[in-house]
Image (cartoon, rainbow, N blue to C red):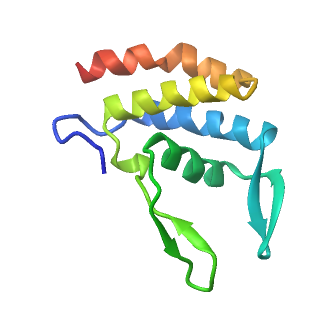
Amino acid sequence: MNSDDTDSKRTLSQNSKMWPMLTDFSRQKKWRCTVAGTWVMKLMPPAHWKAVLTAAFAEETEMAEGWTGGVVMLGESTSNYGVKRMADFITWLYANGNEVGIVWSEKSEHAHRMFGAHNYAKKAA
């Protein structure tokens, strides 16, 4: 877990910003995942993108065997992020989403204007 003990918990506005971004990924980016044990390329729901992207952000590679087979990624939970770490994650989402051609929805753009990463950094300082 990388939450800084001196950093206050992530804000509700940060959480409100993250979900539209994850929804943008879920509607636009196909990803390799399993369906009934078979690997396929498909769109995934926002919660699945959250697992993939938080693991990538934290550079996590730990896995556990699934209860009935398969594997489960182990890693950080954004609910444990402090304000600064969450701001870094949101900035990372933008950078990586831009790199793979995500077109940010009006909801994501509105949240960015209202709760941009620079606002979180000021609160964390």
- Is residue 60 left or right of 20 when viewed as pictured? left
Note whether 3 is above or below 108 in the view shown.
Answer: below
Question: x and y percent of residue 42 in the render?
Answer: 83, 53
Note whether 102 is above or below 71 in the view shown.
Answer: above
Question: x and y percent of residue 10 in the render?
Answer: 36, 37
Instruction: Pick out the residue farthest to the bottom.
Output: 68
- Is residue 78 left or right of 35 when viewed as pictured? left
| Observer-nearest of 83 and 42 | 42
Q: Quadrant of the C terminus?
A: top left
Q: Residue at x 46, y 33 (%)?
A: 89
Question: x and y percent of residue 72 in the render?
Answer: 55, 68
Question: x and y percent of residue 57 in the render?
Answer: 48, 40
Q: Residue at x 56, y 19 (%)?
A: 112
* Residue 9 placement: quadrant: top left
| Observer-nearest of 117 and 56 | 56
Q: Residue at x 71, y 24 (%)?
A: 104
Note whether 105 is above or below 40 in the view shown.
Answer: above
Q: Residue at x 77, y 75 (%)?
A: 37
Looking at the rendered structure, the number of numbered marks drawn on it comes to 0
